[in-house]
Image (tube, grey):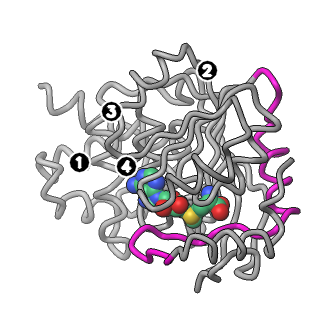
Amino acid sequence: MAVLGDPKKTIEILNRYHFVFQKKFGQNFLIDTHVLTKIIQAAHITKEDIVLEIGPGIGTMTQYLCESAKEVIAVEIDRNLIPILRNDTLKDYKNITIVEGDILKVDLVSLLSEKRTMPLKIVANLPYYITTPILMNLLESNLSIENLTVMVQKEVADRMQAKPATKDYGALSLAVQYYAEPYFVANVPPNCFLPRPTVGSAVIRLSPYKEPPVCIKDKELFFRVIRASFNQRRKTLLNGLNNAKEISVSKEVLEKALKNANISVMTRGETLSLAQFAALADEIFQLSQN
Ligand code: SAM
């Protein structure tokens, strides 16, 4: 039975192993059973599911996952946590594979395909210092992912689901929303963790699209246009793009591309929708071919 949601149990394990929290690994362990249950429910975990957990810590959420899913694969970077997981907190579960490694370096495609574990669900209380690279690596990968339900810094959750013309809207909103549909699950206050983080947290679920919501001719250029548009938020789109090193076309071409995409030269990047960025990037692509 999952017992680690109880803060007393967590403290007991930490003391027994003289565990020292490593700030560099973003270690804030969950100690709230309501939040744990909410994450499992939001991820729609069933007995048919294969789940990848990033950063199991001492295995608190992993226990919940092992009880709800068919199979769980957990990747943990901190070697001091591996014996706790293997010899103690997860030793009674037969459906867990513990992998010691860095989630940004582990070859997930071969790890998961060996186990015929597609499609999969991903669940994590993420280490906040590498939230964006972890999520973008997964969204851009060829893995067949049904959903990712993750705890992130509250501000990052707000940015991921932000709509155009709001203060949180930016390159991350567009990158996430190109690949997946975000759903805000819950706010989580600092007292649900040990130690308490200095920032607020939130759980967000991302459901990757089978097909992206917009068709684009050159994905790399599309993301370069997005980044350039938000690099100089105070400038108009035309000036922002014209000043950007990564966009190597003339101001005249940019003006024409904006006109062809029905976007005013005075517009600011933060008001453009995903579809408008797609239209603009396609026009730049087309014009730069001539
Ligand atoms: N899942 C646990 C919980 O909810 O109590 C721990 C969550 S804690 C916020 C983040 C976990 O990710 C830590 O166990 C940390 O050691 C691990 N971690 C940090 N960087 C990692 C990386 N690059 N690859 C794999 N795990 C990592």
Name the residue carrying label 4. Answer: 102
- Give the distance between the C-alpha atoms of the residues marked 4 and 3, in whole angstroms: 27 Å
Name the residue carrying label 2. Answer: 119
Q: Give the residue type at disc 1.
A: Leu
> N-terminal of the two: label 1 or label 2?
2
Q: In the rendering, at what x and y percent does residue 258 appear? A: 34, 46
Range of residues picked out in magenta: 20-48
Name the residue carrying label 1. Answer: 254
> Which circle, 4 or 3, is nearer the viewer?
4
Query: Can residue 249 be seen here?
Result: yes
- Label 2 neighbourhood size at 10 Å, few (<14), some (14-19), many (20+)? some
Task: Work out which quarter of the rendered image holds the C terminus and state it.
Answer: top left
Q: How many marks?
A: 4
Pointer 3 with pointer 2, Cβ within 8 A: no
Q: Give the residue type at disc 4.
A: Asp
SS label for mark 4: loop
> Which circle, 1 or 4, is nearer the viewer?
4
Q: In the rendering, at what x and y percent does residue 19 appear? A: 53, 74
- Label 1 neighbourhood size at 10 Å, few (<14), some (14-19), many (20+)? many
Q: Is residue 20 left or right of residue 261?
A: right
| Quadrant in which residue 210 is drawn | top right
Q: Is residue 27 magenta?
A: yes
Question: Which residue is depicted at the point 44% across and 77% down?
Answer: 23
Q: Which numbered tag is attached to residue 26?
A: none
> N-terminal of the two: label 1 or label 3?
3
Q: Which numbered tag is attached to residue 219?
A: 3
